[in-house]
Image (spheres, helix red, strand yellow):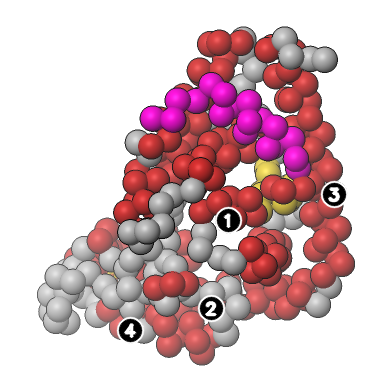
Amino acid sequence: HHDAYFLVADWNALAVSGHAPHEIEQYSWAMVIDCLACGVNPKVATLFIQSWVPELTDVHMILASVTPKAWLERLPSYREMVAGLGEQQGASLAMLGAPLMQAADILALRGQVVPAGPEQRAHIEFTREVARRFNHLYGNVFPEPQAHLTRAPRLPGTDGRKMSKSYRNEIRLSDDPERIKKKIMPMVTDPARARRNDPGNPEVCPVFDLHKVFTGEKGREWVVEGCTTAGIGCADCKNHLLERMLPRMEPVSARRREFQQDPGRVKMVLQEGSTQARSIARQTMDEVRQAMKIKY
Ligand code: SF4
């Protein structure tokens, strides 16, 4: 059992995304509403907005003073980001520092376990290195967090690539059943299964990644058996997925509509959560100042 924290990383969005600043608010509300609709219960979990907890920025500043620039430059996410930028547009300082900002969020709240996708692992390892470096220099303040991979750590888009609005391959929590069906049925599958009689491998199929989220163990065994022996077709497999997926998605979209109509309630959840997160981050900052002998 762990206390759970969910943060809306609006400062990170400002640092790394191509969004115009005025769009961040809209995305922030949508993300929180999605979390609440999916069943994150604010009575037991803390939801908050990064920029509403200024102590996180303090911790970021402190960690920046002990983190070599080269550690950030060698992170694969940064290299990819720079490669994706146009010729004239160099990386900003905030972009380079974004993973450290994430590390500061985790460390300021004394995070012990961080649910992460495979591509986030390098960031968690980096966070551990930063914590070790600080602890080595000034004394034991930060616990080293562990990455935790879930059963389905990767949820690809309908074309098998990373799910992203800019690829237009996303399945939205707001999609109605008809729409979801229209997206699932033509979904990319194991390319080796070109014909109905070709056996396939679920482990390389993005449809099976969705099965890992929505289908129980028995159902998944049925898929593996049917796919690898060409006993079932991909349409059967997708229909099986839809039968499990749609009943799970419907209450989520109903709750989403409910929260959308009650922005006051959502805001209150975030205000309370941010107050809670602040009290912890403030305590951490206090210990940091003590350890560094800059408590004046
Ligand atoms: Fe993918 Fe299912 Fe087709 Fe196998 S049967 S390739 S798991 S869609």
Residue drawn at x 83%, y 72% as measured from the top left: 262
Q: Is residue 220 visible?
A: no
The residue type indicated by label 1 comes to Ala
The residue type indicated by label 2 comes to Leu
The answer to if 60 sits in the magenta stretch is yes
Residue placed under numbered mark 4 in the picture: 186
Depth-wise, is mark 2 or mark 1 nearer the camera? 1
Q: Which mark is residue 272?
A: 3
The quadrant of the rendering that contains the N terminus is top right
Q: Position of residue 153 (x, y in %)?
A: 43, 52
The residue type indicated by label 4 comes to Pro
Structural distance between the alpha carbons of marks 2 and 1 = 31 Å
Depth-wise, is mark 4 or mark 3 nearer the camera? 3
Mark toward the start of the polypeptide (2 vs 1)? 1
Viewer-closest of 259 and 8: 8
Viewer-closest of 101 and 296: 296
Q: Position of residue 32 (x, y in %)?
A: 69, 61
Mark toward the start of the polypeptide (4 vs 3)? 4
Q: Which residues are magenta?
A: 53-70
Whether residue 284 is situated above or below residue 164 in the rendered picture? above
Q: Residues within 10 Å of mark 4 (few under 14, many from 20)?
A: few
Viewer-closest of 189 and 63: 63
Residue drawn at x 40%, y 45% as measured from the top left: 78
Residue drawn at x 42%, y 77% as measured from the top left: 168
Structural distance between the alpha carbons of marks 1 and 3 = 22 Å
